Image: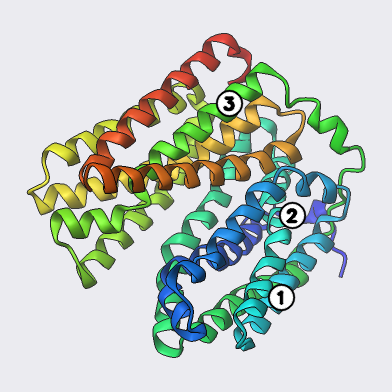
Amino acid sequence: MNMNLSKMNPTWIIWIMTFGTFGILSTELGFIGILPQVANFFSVSIDQAGLFLSCFSLIIAVGSLFIPIVVSKYNRRHLFILVLGVMTLFSFIGGLMTNFYLALLCRIIPAFFYPAYVSLTFTVAGELVPSNETPKAVSKLVIGVSAGSIFGVPLSTIFANYGGYPWAMFFFGFLNFISLIVTILFFPSIEGNNDVSLKGQLRHVGSGVFILSCIGVIIFAAGFNTYYSYASAFLQGIYGIIGSNLSLILFIYGIMSIPGSWLAGRLLIKYPLRTVVLCPLLICVNLAIFYFVNDSWTLMYIFMATFGVLEGIFNNIIQFWIFSSIPEAPEFANGVFMSMLNIGITIGTFIGGLIIVDVGMSAIIIGAIIILIISMIFFIIRSQLYPNHT
């Protein structure tokens, strides 16, 4: 089935990719909520079960640097069908495995295909619209990323609670299968870029604007996740919020990240520099209020809702800041975006854990604020040295 791209609405194509991103991100992030079931099903320790997450993330962090460039020459429709097919197949096979290491292998193999879809969807979105509309198109894809966290994690947990690890894997397989069918039926044939070479794209790595952008993004993501990675534990430990109340608050947080993504797409078009610089500052203010006023449930709900909006803007800023540093190498830029984000998450989670052990749970907010201020300094430095890249 070969559709004429000119007859397709770019918005419709982007929403197809958004749903595909949702399915793949659910497959990645869904394991956050089912590690106890994984450990129980395979009779392994919780840290061994954590390999299902850490191995997947590590492969993405490394593979995102070169896989999108290597596969960029291939037809987008054919490539996306292949990736979604692999995700579907190994999700179902993984759900049938009773051996821990074979199940882990079924988790590792799809991770190599992940960057070929998620990173390239950002490139395709940019190709479908005028250059000045790229942030708005990208913001739709970020909604898919947010939805993977908002709905993927709780839904996978529900299935795992009902039928154990296999049911969660079948749920991931079902989501990717639906995305596969929609892509086969409706996604048009879009030729790849034969002019892209690994060597040609990597020549941008040594540029000052690119290096500053990567450092700033890693620090920004690390600062954000110093708190966010432990948000559930923080709300339980400081506020005593558990059970359905905790689920409701986190759901509100997740839902609010969707309008945050929508808002970011418009702000980055009209006020790119101000949006980038002010976002970490606003996160710091929000965290500071939450730190000093922690005895009001009303303020806590407002805080989490506001934090959700800022999280949606945060994801868009990271993609925009990397892409704007090397716009002439979109495949590489979007791969680096995924890689730097995962590195920042890893560092932030590690720092947050150290702070909790050595200082205490409430201190992660102070740590996050300090790191976010440092990231803002790097954003300002880049904007002053390279004003034409914003």
Q: Secondary structure at mark 3?
A: helix
Numbered tag placed on residue 213 in the rendering: 3
- Cα distance between the residues tagged 1 and 2: 18 Å
Instruction: Locate residue 92 relative to residue 73 in the image: left or right.
Output: left
Residue depicted at x 76% and y 62%: 80
Ranked by sequence position, the earlier of labels 2 and 3 is 2
Question: The disc labelled 1 sits on which kind of residue?
Answer: Ile
Q: Secondary structure at mark 1?
A: helix
Q: Secondary structure at mark 2?
A: helix
Q: Nearer the viewer, mark 1 or mark 3?
A: 3
Colouring style = rainbow
Residue depicted at x 20% and y 44%: 362
Q: Is residue 196 above or below residue 178?
A: above
Residue contact at pointers 1 and 2, CB within 8 angstroms: no
Would you name the residue on which mark 2 appears? 116
Neighbor class of circle 3 (other Cα within 10 Å; few <14, some 14-19, many 20+) is many
Neighbor class of circle 1 (other Cα within 10 Å; few <14, some 14-19, many 20+) is some
Numbered tag placed on residue 374 in the rendering: none
In which quadrant of the rendered image does the C terminus lie?
A: top right
Would you name the residue on which mark 1 appears? 181
Instruction: Locate residue 217 relative to residue 87 in the image: left or right.
Output: left
Q: Is residue 55 above or below residue 390?
A: below
Q: Position of residue 49 (x, y in %)?
A: 50, 71
Ranked by sequence position, the earlier of labels 1 and 2 is 2
- Cα distance between the residues tagged 1 and 3: 38 Å
